[in-house]
Amino acid sequence: MKQLLMIPVILLMISCNGQNKVKMSEKQTTKTEKKAILTYPKASSFVNSPLRNRMVLELNQPTSEVYNLVGDPANMPKFSAGLEKVETETKNEKCTSYTCYFKPIEEGEKGIIHTEKVVWQETDLGWASSKKEATEFGFTENFSLTTLEAKGDKTILTWDMHFNHENQEMLEMNKTTLVDVFDDMAEQLIAKFDGKIIENYIE
């Protein structure tokens, strides 16, 4: 008799456990859906300039490790030889702007100082910055987008650069210079995380 009475209890426990699993599954799906909804910003939302340069790396570390370095603009001198330092301003633990202090081209000269506004930043996903008005280099419609995408236990790091210049010669010169800059950055990032260059695109 006791065994018969236990059957409904066992069935009830199985039913509850099944419902809990469904609820947990729904929660997991919701989290996944929320993550999928969050997308990278489009350059066209901020500037009219086309993509001029792009660097794509496959790094042998998870996105959290890579983001710890590249997710903060203040860290750029750690993997870019042309920068003396980068100062940042933050609000609610997110970067709102950064100022680059470039090393002088010739000894004794003063290095160029350049400031951009951070328009997007998400932990482990990346950040973007923009400046529509003319920079100290004479470039306009600037937009820089750095994104991180998980590929198993590796990270695909993509760095896009959009900009314009009224002088075609200066435009071409900067595009060519950025190829060298990205090569330097790629070499230093690969030395830190291991990996390979997938692309160093120039328009």
Image: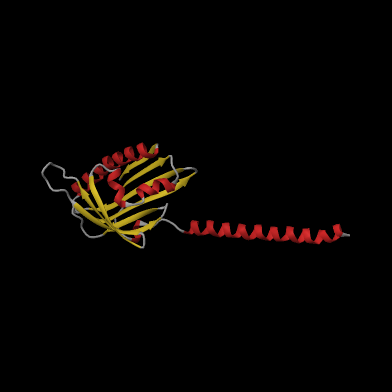
Residue 115 coordinates in the image, percent (x, y) = 23, 56
148 horizontally vs 131: left or right: right
Q: How many marks?
A: 0
User: Residue shown at 68%/61% (left/top)?
Assistant: 19
User: Residue sitting at 60 percent across and 60 percent down?
Assistant: 26
The residue at the point 20 percent across, 48 percent down is: 102
> The N terminus lies in which quarter of the figure?
bottom right
Does residue 109 appear left or right of residue 197 in this picture? left
72, 130: nearer the viewer: 72
Q: Which percent across, then down, holds residue 163?
A: 27, 53
Q: Residue furthest left?
A: 108
How is the rendered protein coloured? secondary structure
Which residue is found at the position 19% from the left and 45% from the top? 103
* Picture layout, residue 168 above or below residue 12: above
Q: Would residue 52 be seen by someone viewing this image from the given angle?
A: no
Residue 17 percent location from the top left of the image:
69, 58
Q: Locate the C terminus and report the quarter of the image it occupies.
A: top left
Front residue of 16 and 35: 16
Q: Is residue 53 above or below residue 5?
A: above
State the residue in front, 27 or 201: 27
Q: Residue furthest bottom?
A: 92
Residue 96 horizontal side relative to residue 174, left or right: right
Q: Relative to 203, does residue 9 appear above or below in the rendering?
A: below
Q: Is residue 160 visible?
A: yes
Residue at the outermost right position: 1
In the image, residue 178 lies at what x, y percent? 26, 44
Seen from the viewer's position, the closer of residues 138 and 128 is 128
